[in-house]
Image (cartoon, rainbow, N blue to C red):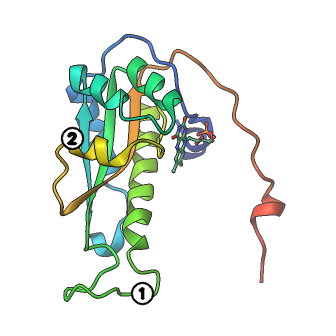
Amino acid sequence: MTAKECITGRRSIRKFTDQPVSHELISKIVETASFAPSWKNTQIVRYIAVEGEKKEQLAKCTSSFPGNGVIISNAPMVVAVTIIKGRSGFERDGSYTTRKGSSWQMFDAGVASEAFCLAAYEQGLGTVIMGIFDEDEAAALLEIPAERELVALVPIGYPAESPVAPRRKTVGDLLTFQ
Ligand SMILES: Cc1cc2nc3c(=O)[nH]c(=O)nc-3n(C[C@H](O)[C@H](O)[C@H](O)COP(=O)(O)O)c2cc1C
């Protein structure tokens, strides 16, 4: 698979088969995703693979968007993307390095999440990044400590659908030259 095939072929998958995702395979995917770039190579992203009863409880942390709960219930595994706060975009004394403040840690989480989803796709797995869930409830369930933050939930499994790519903007819309 070329990089272009991987980037353009990946789709958000919201229906999965019952086939479980092995711990070995998810470890391999995280190893690949670890090569994502990060602020000063701080590597602040940590992944939590959630299965079984805890995943069912996580599915209930979706009152803000119940459709996401159905997707989580049907996925064999959900990977929670978390970050260690206060490093990416920060100086050692705790001050912000740039006027973007703490935004860089979310930037790093996004970069890593896409690397994770692409690595999963290359291994035949489908993913969907979820931003809408009951954050406080989910973080409590996953016992995320105060120095970390839960950013996204990523249901992952073998795809049971092949969605058509949602329409993309044209290069003319996206790119200008100066
Ligand atoms: C930050 C972010 C948050 C998202 N949140 C959700 C979500 O809560 N539920 C969902 O079903 N899809 C969610 N998506 C998936 C987008 O809807 C999807 O990426 C977009 O429609 C483009 O489709 P594609 O991923 O198949 O190319 C999210 C994607 C991103 C990047």
**Is 34 displayed left or right of 24 in the figure?**
right
Taking the spot 30% from the left edge, 76% from the top edge, the residue there is: 40
Label 2 CB sits under 8 Å from any ligand 1 atom: no
**Relative to 122, does residue 161 appear above or below in the rendering?**
above
Instruction: Say which element carries label 1.
Output: loop
Taking the spot 55% from the left edge, 34% from the top edge, the residue there is: 12
**Is 177 displayed left or right of 112 in the figure?**
right
Taking the spot 31% from the left edge, 48% from the top edge, the residue there is: 136
Q: Nearer the viewer, residue 117 or 98?
A: 98
What residue is pinned by disc 1? 98
* Residue, far right: 172
Residue 125 visible in the snapshot: no
**Is 149 displayed left or right of 36 in the figure?**
left
Label 1 CB sits under 8 Å from any ligand 1 atom: no
What residue is pinned by disc 2? 142
- The amino acid pointed to by label 1 is Thr
Asked if the residue under mark 2 is in contact with the one under mark 1, i.e. CB atoms within 8 Å, the reply is no
Q: Nearer the viewer, residue 148 or 36?
A: 148
Residue 157, position as x, y percentages in the image: 40, 23
Instruction: Say which element carries label 2.
Output: loop
Cα–Cα span, label 1 and label 2: 31 Å
Residue 5, position as x, y percentages in the image: 59, 38
